[in-house]
Structure formats: structure tokens, C-alpha cells
Image (tube, rainbow, N blue to C red):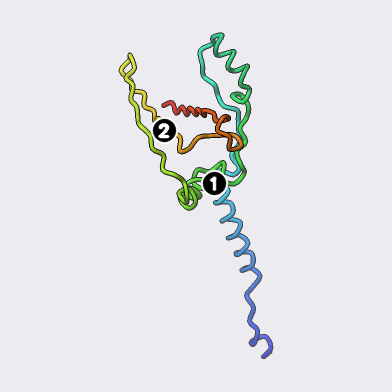
Amino acid sequence: MSAMLETPELPAVFDGVKLAAVAAVLYVIVRCLNLKSPTAPPQLIYQDSALARFLIKSCPLLTKEYIPPLIWGKSGHIQTALYGKMGRVRSPHPYGHRKYLTMPDGATATFDLFEPQSEHCIGGQSHSCWLQLILILCPG
């Protein structure tokens, strides 16, 4: 009887509680980070025209389903945390000019123009420098 008093062990129910707590934490992580959210092709809304049909036919990427990277691609929370920790380590500050255009209907279109930090050359050869244009549209 004295042997039982010397080695008190917790009942097996505590192992189940630990397992349930771990399962609950994992469930919350999966739900909050949208790791199980389904992916779907984008819904394109456009006026049917020859140009629209040409663009959709020429750019099949517009109608394909986007499958983001598993962990950080489905959750803006992880992307924000990663950028907050790593994004500003050695990134140069872009210097640009904001432009405003007033549309005929009174709406305002705003865009930024940035100058390149350095020339884009292939293989370090000055005769193979090229112009890189990037256009980002955020409607709404």
C-alpha cells in the first residue's frame, strides 16, 4: 500500500484532455488560416466583344484555377506577419510620382509612376538593356 502512495500518477483522462487541447488548437489554426478553403477559377465579368473573346482566348491563365502555396498563400494573416518580419530588411524605398486623372464621369483614376533603381541588363551587357513595364490594376 505504501508503494501506491509514493508514485501518484495522473488518471488516463488527463492524456485525453491534452490530446483534445492539441486537436482544438490545430482546428483553430486550420480554420483561421483558411488552409482548407476551396480554390476556384475567377469569375470574369465582361461585355461580350471581339476584344474580350480574343483576350480570354489568348490568356488562358485568366480562366484557370489559382492554387496558392499551401501555408502562407491562403491566409493574409501569415503574409502580413512574414512581411512585417522580413519584408523591410533590405528592400529599397521606391521613389515615384502619384498621378490623378479625372474621368469624364467625374471619377478619379489614381496611379503611381516609379523610376527604375538601376538598368535591367541581360548578362551585364549594356547593349542588351531592356525596358520592363509592370501594370497593376486594382478596380474598386
Q: Nearer the viewer, residue 89 or 67?
A: 89
Please state which amino acid type lies under the numbered disc 1: Leu
Q: Nearer the viewer, residue 18 or 92?
A: 92
The quarter of the image holding the N terminus is: bottom right
Q: Which residue is mark 2?
A: 114
Label number found at residue 33: 1
Residue 61 located left or right of residue 97: right
User: Which residue is drawn at the image coordinates 41% and 39% (left, top)?
Assistant: 94
Quadrant for residue 124, please give it. Answer: top right
Disc 1 crowd, CA 10 A, few/some/many (<14, 14-19, 20+)? some
Quadrant for residue 72, please give it. Answer: top right
Expressed as whole percent of the image width and height from the top left, the position of residue 114 reads 41, 33
Q: Residue furthest top?
A: 50
Please state which amino acid type lies under the numbered disc 2: Phe
Expressed as whole percent of the image width and height from the top left, the position of residue 42 reads 57, 27
Above or below residue 85? Residue 9 is below
Q: Earlier in the sequence, mark 2 or mark 1?
A: 1
User: Which residue is drawn at the image coordinates 61% and 32% (left, top)?
Assistant: 66
Disc 2 crowd, CA 10 A, few/some/many (<14, 14-19, 20+)? few
Q: Secondary structure at mark 1?
A: loop
Q: Secondary structure at mark 2?
A: strand
Label 2 or label 1, whichever lies nearer to me, is 2
Expressed as whole percent of the image width and height from the top left, the position of residue 36 reads 61, 42
User: Which residue is drawn at the image coordinates 58% and 34% (left, top)?
Assistant: 125
Q: Nearer the viewer, residue 35 or 46?
A: 46
State how far apart marks 2 and 1 are (Cα). 34 Å
The quarter of the image holding the C terminus is: top left
